[in-house]
């Protein structure tokens, strides 16, 4: 059935491409894909090109921006439909953009949403276990990502890039994995003949990204909101914050797993949490039509198998606001509360139909005074 749908998507993409006059032909197009780090790498790349004086647009899962214009795209993590892609590219051309950075998801690749777009450069951050609810196997998921990488006139993969591209450059975002993201962005810019001085200026100008290791509170303890929603993402986020606390302080993590998505990762993420945090709070993250209690129990299965003890080292709080409140109540001087899974998103889906307004950052700011006075 999906293959039939993808034929429809392909036709729609080409109709849109023709209707909007093949806008990608008038742009230098950079496409970035991968399981984790796509948005951050896209933002780094956009910043570098902007510092070099290039009129560059950006289309990510957070926003579309070009010139003085910005459109929020931060509901859930996927690329726009084919019609919107071509429409936005046409708008960018009309606004005088010469370059564009596109964040490209595996769903978008499989569904031909970027058909008709010529990619001058493609970049791959990484490929880890994710989206198997859609792709059915890791091999199929990997093949989808690699098929996109091969479409670029120039193709670059983060794991094959020398550390030397960042020599003398300070990466200001928290987390060692952001160094990898910066490396890929630097390599892309250098491949486009952007001078090293602008690579440095661009990377160093990125000091915060919504929902990406974003420090929401930093006084008696620290509260960080991050988008990590995969096993690797959770592991790298936790191991990064572990280096920021003393041996006397605690790492507390709040996370869940989305409903109607890759259920294989749920026990693995529970295991990763209890092994790398002092206290784990399992909660809702867009359960959709699935029972949030069942999802939490599936995560808890991995936590228990890894030696976690219910109501001692891990807790189940299906209501996300209550989970965050509980985590804040457990934070001691110097601790870090890491809240993952939602990141920049501005809504949550509890029933498979309705997107309700939601922001981890706003909830933290609402609750924080209760636990810091």
Image (spheres, rainbow, N blue to C red):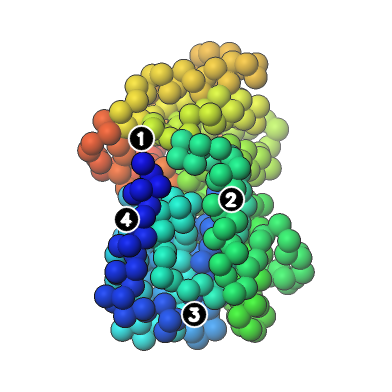
Query: Is residue 254 visible to us here?
Result: yes
Q: In this rendering, which labeled residue sits more in front, label 2 or label 4?
A: 4
Whether tag 2 and tag 1 are in contact, CB under 8 A, the answer is no
Viewport quadrant of the N terminus: top left
Q: Earlier in the sequence, mark 2 or mark 4?
A: 4
Left or right: residue 331 compared with residue 1: right
Which residue is painted at 36% across and 35% down in the image? Answer: 286
Q: Front-most of 217 and 318?
A: 318
Q: Is residue 115 above or below residue 279?
A: below
Dot 2: few (<14), some (14–19), or many (≥20) neighbours within 10 Å? Answer: some
Q: Is residue 209 above or below residue 283?
A: below
Q: Position of residue 71 (x, y in %)?
A: 30, 65
Q: Front-most of 201 and 42?
A: 42
Q: Position of residue 268 (x, y in %)?
A: 59, 28
Q: Secondary structure at mark 2?
A: helix
Dot 4: few (<14), some (14–19), or many (≥20) neighbours within 10 Å? Answer: few
Give the Cα separation between the discs numbered 2 and 1.
Answer: 27 Å
Q: Earlier in the sequence, mark 3 or mark 1?
A: 3
Q: In this rendering, which labeled residue sits more in front, label 1 or label 4?
A: 4
Viewport quadrant of the C terminus: top left
Q: Earlier in the sequence, mark 3 or mark 4?
A: 4
Which residue is painted at 66% across and 71% down in the image? Answer: 187
Circle on res. 328: none
Residue ID for mark 4:
8
Q: Earlier in the sequence, mark 1 or mark 4?
A: 4
Q: Secondary structure at mark 1?
A: loop
Left or right: residue 348 compared with residue 41: left
Residue ID for mark 1:
286
Left or right: residue 69 compared with residue 265: left
Residue ID for mark 3:
28
Q: In this rendering, which labeled residue sits more in front, label 3 or label 4?
A: 4
Circle on res. 143: 2
């Amino acid at each position: 059935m999906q293959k039939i749908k993808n034929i429809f998507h392909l036709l729609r993409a080409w109709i849109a491409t023709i209707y909007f006059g093949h806008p990608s032909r008038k742009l230098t197009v950079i496409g970035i894909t991968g399981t984790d780090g796509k948005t951050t790498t896209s933002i780094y790349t956009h910043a570098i090109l902007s510092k070099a004086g290039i009129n560059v647009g950006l289309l990510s899962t957070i926003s579309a921006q070009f010139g003085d214009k910005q459109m929020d795209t931060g509901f859930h993590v996927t690329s726009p439909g084919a019609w919107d892609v071509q429409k936005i590219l046409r708008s960018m051309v009309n606004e005088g953009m010469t370059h564009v950075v596109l964040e490209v998801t595996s769903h978008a690749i499989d569904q031909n949403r970027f058909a008709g777009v010529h990619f001058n450069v493609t970049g791959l951050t990484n490929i880890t276990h994710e989206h198997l609810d859609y792709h059915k196997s890791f091999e199929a998921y990997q093949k989808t990502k690699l098929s996109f990488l091969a479409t670029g006139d120039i193709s670059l993969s983060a794991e094959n890039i020398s550390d030397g591209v960042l020599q003398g450059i300070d990466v200001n975002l928290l987390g060692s994995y952001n160094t990898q993201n910066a490396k890929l962005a630097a390599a892309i810019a250098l491949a486009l003949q952007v001078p090293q001085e602008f690579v440095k200026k661009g990377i160093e100008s990125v000091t915060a990204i919504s929902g990406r290791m974003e420090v929401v509170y930093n006084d008696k303890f620290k509260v960080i909101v991050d988008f990590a929603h995969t096993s690797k993402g959770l592991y790298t986020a936790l191991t990064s914050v572990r280096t920021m606390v003393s041996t006397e302080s605690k790492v507390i993590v709040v996370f869940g797993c989305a409903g109607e998505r890759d259920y294989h990762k749920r026990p693995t993420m529970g295991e990763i949490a209890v092994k790398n945090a002092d206290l784990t709070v399992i909660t809702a993250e867009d359960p959709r039509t699935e029972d949030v209690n069942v999802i939490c129990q599936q995560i808890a299965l991995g936590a228990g198998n890894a030696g976690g003890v219910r109501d001692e080292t891990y807790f189940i709080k299906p209501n996300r606001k209550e989970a965050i409140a509980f985590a804040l109540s457990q934070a001691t001087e110097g601790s870090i509360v890491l809240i993952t899974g939602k990141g920049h998103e501005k809504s949550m889906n509890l029933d498979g139909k309705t997107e309700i307004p939601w922001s981890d950052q706003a909830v933290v700011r609402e609750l924080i005074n209760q636990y810091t006075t």
